[in-house]
Image (tube, grey):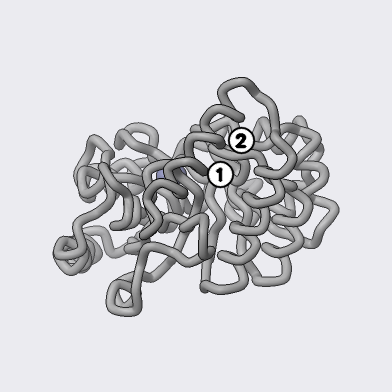
């Protein structure tokens, strides 16, 4: 099995360690057909991309596309799902620059009601730390993600269930309805085998991503593939792997 494209990689524009070219070079050396640069959305308190850098990233990618003509290089973003509204932390102006939009839930995104959003993050953090899916919180989390899926044009939902507990089947159904790929992360533990099986009961497609924060990890997919295999996910449900 080989990976055809890696649509989730980070660079120094958020909190990755390498430059855009570092990621592109590794993707090229590993024989990928396409790679996406998807730094964290601008709403994140500590490591979001700076809005005024998005055009610069676009220019860098245009230049690299000339240097690496055989591989498609996309500019994307890993937008943050704002828990309260289900909206993302990117606007129409930002969207002009992106070829692909990923979105996921992370701590560190605050709404106008700062205390309430902090409280939600804290409860999610605690719930994950003690590994107890508090029912009411799990319902709220699921609603926020489902709302985000229907209210935005998201290509890939990143690491569902990683920083919060959710009802995975409802999420999978919304992904299927909205034509959103569900990510299987090579870097994070986020869905159990049982949850993957539940998700697969819906007509949803999966994508394996490295979520690389260092260039060497770009194109890594073996762990993600193993997780999918262990859960019995049919390989033809994963859009970016190939037998040959
Ligand atoms: Zn993420
Ligand atoms: Zn990421």
* Sequence-first disc among 1 and 2: 1
C-alpha span from label 1 to label 2: 6 Å
Q: Residue furthest top?
A: 130
Q: Residue 170 in the image: x percent, y percent?
A: 76, 56
Q: Is residue 125 left or right of residue 34?
A: right
- Which quadrant contains ligand 1? top left
**Mark 1 nearby-residue class (10 Å; few <14, some 14–19, many ≥20):** many
Q: Is mark 1 within 8 Å of ligand 1?
A: yes
Residue of label 1:
159
Q: Is residue 123 left or right of residue 131?
A: left
Q: In the rendered image, is residue 35 in sight? A: no
Q: Residue at x 79, y 62 (%)?
A: 203
**Mark 2 nearby-residue class (10 Å; few <14, some 14–19, many ≥20):** many
Q: Residue 7 in the image: x percent, y percent?
A: 45, 54
The kind of secondary structure element at disc 1 is loop
Q: Residue furthest right?
A: 201
The kind of secondary structure element at disc 2 is loop
Q: Are marks 1 and 2 in contact (CB under 8 Å)?
A: yes
Residue of label 2:
190
Q: Residue at x 68, y 32 (%)?
A: 227
50 or 10, which is in the foreground?
Answer: 50
Q: Residue 15 in the image: x percent, y percent?
A: 27, 39
């Amino acid at each position: 099995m080989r990976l055809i494209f890696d649509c989730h990689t980070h660079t120094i524009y958020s909190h990755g360690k390498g430059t855009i070219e570092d990621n592109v070079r590794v993707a090229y050396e590993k024989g990928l057909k396409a790679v996406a640069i998807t730094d964290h959305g601008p709403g994140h308190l500590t490591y979001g991309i700076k809005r005024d850098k998005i055009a610069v990233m676009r220019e860098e990618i245009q230049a690299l596309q000339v240097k690496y003509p055989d591989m498609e290089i996309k500019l994307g973003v890993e937008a943050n799902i704002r828990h309260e509204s289900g909206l993302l932390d990117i606007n129409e102006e930002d969207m002009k620059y992106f070829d692909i939009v990923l979105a996921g839930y992370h701590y560190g995104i605050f709404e106008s009601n700062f205390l309430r959003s902090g409280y939600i993050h804290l409860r999610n953090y605690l719930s994950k730390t003690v590994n107890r899916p508090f029912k009411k919180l799990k319902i709220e989390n699921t609603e926020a993600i489902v709302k985000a899926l229907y209210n935005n044009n998201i290509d890939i939902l990143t690491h569902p269930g990683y920083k919060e507990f959710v009802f995975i089947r409802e999420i999978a159904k919304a992904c299927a309805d909205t034509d959103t790929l569900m990510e299987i992360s090579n870097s994070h533990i986020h869905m159990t085998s049982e949850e993957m099986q539940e998700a697969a009961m819906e007509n949803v497609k999966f994508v394996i991503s490295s979520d690389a924060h260092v260039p060497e990890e770009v194109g890594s997919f073996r762990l993600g593939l193993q997780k999918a295999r262990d859960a019995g996910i049919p390989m033809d449900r994963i859009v970016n792997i190939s037998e040959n």
